[in-house]
Image (cartoon, grey):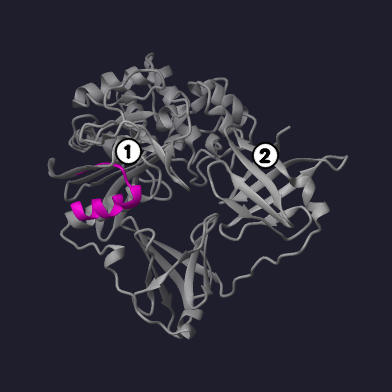
Amino acid sequence: MSEVVKAQSAGDRFMGSVLVAKDGTTVFEQSSGWADIEWKIPNTAVTKFRLGSMTKQFTAAAILLLEEQGKLKVEDPLSKFIPSAPEAWKPVTLYHLLTHTSGIPSFTDLPEYGTWKLSPESPAQMMAHIRDKPLDFPPGEKFKYSNSGYVLLGWVVELASGQSYETFLREHIFRPLGMNDSGYDSNTAVIPQRASGYVPGPAGLTNAPYIDMHVPGGAGALYSTTADLLRWTQGLFGGKLLSAASLQKMTTPFKSSYAFGLGVSTVKGHKVIAHAGAIEGFNTQLTYYPESKVTVVVLANVNGTAAGELAGQLATLAFGETVTLSAERKEAEVPVAVLQRYVGVYRLSSQITNTIRLTDGRLTTQLSGQAPLPLFAESEKRFFLKIVNAQVEFFTDEQGKVTHLVQYQNGQERQAGRISDTVVERQTITLPRATLEPYVGTYELRPGFDLAITLEGEQLMSQATGQAKLPLFAEAETKFFLKVVDAQVEFFKDANGVVTHLILHQGGRDIKGLRQP
């Protein structure tokens, strides 16, 4: 296990603490990297980390405790507690919020979120931002992850209990379970042994962007340690907190394998109850295997995929299986004619595709909104990535036609059906310098994060704050695209022909950037 932690820690991909336990007994724990880079303070087993969305399971448990106290029912409409909720929300119940099936848009998906997160906004203020937005779908019809729902649930905890969310969790969850190193994070309080958060940048790690911790609330504002999260799994699944009936509710999925603040699925024949977290500077993963009583905790104070990957690897080892690191995989020679058969577009979800190309004799994989990454063959149908611990396997029908691929990462398997056997590349056009010059300027995508547009000779360039300068290629007079990542930039003008703003299309999101004076 120490070897996989070491491998993930290379190049500062992972900094943090991990713990693996079986039957409540810790069998492995290790810390890596710095809790504070500037002071060279190392992470340890008692370092406190922001949890991000791992918070949601605590919010769900608080709702169920209040139900046991007779103060609410999960079938209650949200409007019972928040009468000022908009008319469109009247059919929304607490159950819908718990299972991400309310249809209420997630405030973190909105362009204005970059501004909101800098101020100490209350749940009521958050609701004011989204109350006039239409529902994404009728309540109960679909699953769509919504941080708004869990901020509202945190508010319901306060309204139903008469206590602050922080106080209720401390008195009814943390203190009874002995979780003395857990709590509601704060931008002002001095919290001993709390890690600083970092993000990768072109020149190495940088301090994470600011977020006011009032904003994530019941959706993501807690902090904890690896040992406290083991106490949590022991208490929750050991019957020390909820009744058997409440725990059954909490772990019964409704849609898309999501229950109450927890994902419930089967991986390699093992039942898995888990949730990840991501917030500025931190990525986390808590996974519990109820049949074998194995707990895996990974808390990282640098953003990236390492926490999820590491949790999957540690679980694999905990079950006595082997983990092959990317550096240990051996490349195989596969004829170009065979590689050509895999080229195409594969759909992972409604918003995410995986585009497979063949470039200079090698396959590349590119997820929506991301950069293309090289694939290395280890057999005729199975390939691996070196930059992350992930593999891709292609499958064919009886006639040998490629039907789908499967991505293996973080101990999970995701199937993507082939929707096209060709890749339509964007066509570049040449625009005169006089057409490009009006686009030069700085555009604010969110406070503290700009997109600078410059002109070098006849080439339009873009550079996001803290990132490398990248060329923009024209496909129309106002529409441009990047080649190194799946992203497009569109410029807009007012009635007088003056450029006022741009929109960055990336990863299924449309981010507006106002031109700065």
Residue 320, picture quadrant? bottom left
Q: Is residue 474 within the magenta segment?
A: no
**Callout 2: 10 Å neighbours few (<14), some, many (20+)?**
many
**Range of the magenta residues?**
1-19
Query: For this rendering, which residue is in front, 478 or 201?
Result: 201
Query: For this rendering, which residue is in front, 186 or 448?
Result: 448
Query: For this rendering, which residue is in front, 354 or 260?
Result: 354
How far apart, in angstroms, are the residues tagged by discs 1 and 2?
A: 44 Å
First in sequence, mark 1 or 2: give its number: 1
Pair 1/2: label in front: 2
Q: Compared to 516, does 341 lie above or below?
A: below
The residue identified by callout 1 is 250
Secondary structure category for the residue under label 1: helix
Query: For this rendering, which residue is in front, 139 or 111?
Result: 111
Q: Give the numbered dot on residue 443.
A: 2
Amino acid at dot 1: Met
**Callout 1: 10 Å neighbours few (<14), some, many (20+)?**
many
- The residue at the point 19 percent across, 33 percent down is 231
Q: Position of residue 53 (x, y in %)?
A: 39, 37
Does residue 1 appear to the left or right of 72 in the view shown? left
